Image: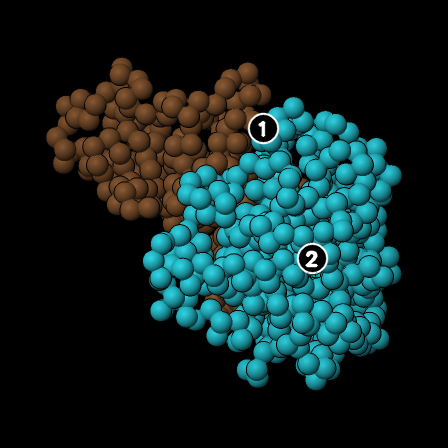
Amino acid sequence: MMKGIYLDNNATTMVDPAIVEEMMPYFTEQFGNPSSMHEFGNKVGFAIKKARKQVQALLGAEHDSEIIFTSCGTESDSTAILSALKAQPERNEIITTVVEHPAVLTLCEQLEKEGYKVHYLKVDTKGQLDLSEYRKLLSDRVAIVSVMWANNETGTIFPAIEMADMASKAGVMFHTDAVQAVGKIPMDLKSSKIDMLSISGHKLHAPKGIGVLYLRRGVRYRPLLRGGHQERGRRAGTENTASIVGLGKAAELALEHMEYENVTVAAMRDRLQEGIMDSVPYSFVTGDPDNRLPNTCNIAFEYIEGEAILMLLNKQGIAASSGSACTSGSLEPSHVMRAMDIPYTAAHGSIRFSLSRYNTMEEIEKVIEAVPPIMVQLRKLSPYWDGDRPVDEPEKAFAPTYA
Amino acid sequence: MWDYSETVKEHFYNPRNAGVAEEANATGDVGSLSCGDALRLTLKVNPETEIIEDAGFQTFGCGSAIASSSALTEIIKGMTLDDALNVSNQDIADYLEGLPPEKMHCSVMGREALQAAVADYRGEEWADDHEEGALICKCFAVDAVLIEDTIRANNLKTVEDVAHYTKAGGGCASCHEGIEEILTKVLEEKGEKFDPTADTVPDVESSPATLVAGASGMTNLQRIRKIEAVIESLRPQLQADNGDVELVDVMGDTIYVNMTGACNGCQMASMTLGGIQQRLIEELGSFVKVLPATEMPKSAAGV
Ligand SMILES: Cc1ncc(COP(=O)(O)O)c(C=O)c1O
Ligand code: FES
């Protein structure tokens, strides 16, 4: 196999070698516990402080104490939502969207079982929200709004700043899962009304298993984990020091590369999309191409199934991901595709290409070469396909008995 | 990535018999809502001999769906229709050297397409009687519909019951929350409440009136011989359904058996276990519990 071409950066990213280097000492000589009084711990404490400032700078947060290190994006999401419910027992409603990551959706489903009322904002065919529907739901019964800043599958960006303003006017707490947005969209949280925000390190070239919850100063808060005084008692548990240092460095690098991401990475993404759309008939871009992360494009290839596409791409060393049910072992194609009303025959064939600053235009050209023959090969096997086009009235020509 | 066998990958990369069989005179179109897979199977059947002379498939589906379709066509070519109908989904999975539990339904789809195509050839109506739900237990590939139906049919009350009847939950135990949810739902329909501390349905302790081992005056050896004989007498019936059963061990009132062939992991396995238990109780005149050998204590302790 040739050197792989990695276009699955929304799933996870490579740890930047500069970051690994920064982390190494914290596994060995700098092993101390930052809480300790001796010299071993002291240096580590300073390293964490530095990392906190680096993350603060990336987010444009007002205070570094607003940065709480957690174990992952999922923990940050859970902490934010559960904290809002605990701190405001008189409020028992939640507003979120139908296209959230399972880190939020599965928790909300569980909270429904426990008696909370969850409002799921719907999306249109481009994956965008109806803000007037949102406005109507804001009330003093709502404990928290949790809306992702950018969607992991399509890259579609939600108007998080505007929605936070609306929540603030209604006196409702606002949390955003910005796991996909941080490092790709410039942020200045101090000038926003966002109360809480989740980050996951491994989406921006830091290691897996480290996250951040941004908590605006003054927002009422109840910790998820109680114990020691780490993170000012807001997240107990001895710090994952090496990873915190790594995430700090990652934040610094992300800030440095913000323009590169939005110009050069975006240009590669656009070229990829154009190259594929030009040569593969019966395919279309899903989501909202005008409001989209610079690194993501999601293309639905009609009448074929995503896992089969991924296996053939993988054979050529190309890594991407799919919204097909088969890749997750679930019953349905991606809830994001379904929410946008994408027909089953296309939703199962949706492929997400997500780039990073480590990709090159040369790689993109190779992928543009590789994709069309794969589609031809699989469509040959498809009962919906005949020669060089779909059968006439595909839904009628092939209407299997469904079990 | 799924843990696909080399054979699955090979059939996916180089599918056999893709496309419509030439001069096809039978077609079966089926789909599985789970995974959104769909398959059209076409057969060329010799009207004199009923031998399948050619088979072709078109599949909208994932890697294992395509591989299962390819395997199916290879298996049935040259068979008579009646022989082909005896091909079970387990045969397809075996031919491919196994499928991940999440993907077993791909082989089920292959078998259904075959039934549909044969029905089409014979001018019969084919109605699908098999409904699929969300996969609950990954260890034993058991879905929600099967668990729900089995709870209803047997008045099951506990997670342990469900494991005895369907195997679901009898392995790593990570699906117990899901099973509890189904129990809660089904019991609620009957106006009952799920009680995690309830006694299990077929349990000896819960019904002191039942007899203990040896109560019918047999020596241990006689008893085991008797058990063997009963199981032996049940085999032809199971074999007719492409299955088989084998006695593995007897520990007190618990009899461990191995279900093999089509019944292993199939939807009927629990029914068959229940059936075997019933027969053994009748024949021995004392209460016994029949469990799959996978539930032998070593696994219970280990995981
Ligand atoms: C939008 C979004 N939220 C949350 C997560 C979960 O993050 P983590 O894997 O760090 O728990 C992910 C990534 O998997 C994500 O894409
Ligand atoms: S998943 Fe059910 S026992 Fe392991």
Q: Which residue is mark 2?
A: A60
Question: Given the image, on which type of amino acid does mark 1 rest?
Answer: Glu
According to the rendering, which colour does chain B have? brown
Residue at 81% over, 40% down: A166
Figure quadrant of residue B69: bottom right
Q: Which chain is cyan?
A: A
Q: Which residue is mark 1?
A: A114
Residue at 70% over, 84% down: A362
In primary-sequence order, the first of circles 2 and 1 is 2
Question: Given the image, on which type of amino acid does mark 2 rest?
Answer: Gly
- x, y percentage for residue B268? 47, 40
Q: Please give left or right for residue B91 compared with residue B59 in the image.
A: left
Instruction: Check if mark 2's residue and mark 1's residue have beta carbons within 8 Å.
Output: no
Q: CA distance from mark 2 to mark 1?
A: 36 Å
- x, y percentage for residue A113? 60, 30
Q: Is residue A364 above or below residue A81?
A: below
Q: Secondary structure at mark 2?
A: loop
- x, y percentage for residue A366? 70, 82
Q: Is residue B30 above or below residue B232?
A: below
Instruction: Inspect this view and state whether residue A233 appears.
Output: yes
Q: In front: B189, or A161?
A: A161
Q: Same chain for labels 2 and 1? Say yes or no.
A: yes
For the N terminus of chain A, the image quarter is bottom right
Q: Please give left or right for residue B180 compared with residue A137 in the image.
A: left
Q: In front: B178, or B220?
A: B178
Figure quadrant of residue A296: bottom right
Residue at 52% over, 65% down: A246
Residue at 57% over, 82% down: A3
How packed mark 2 is, by other alpha carbons closer than 10 Å (few <14, some 14-19, many 20 or more), is some
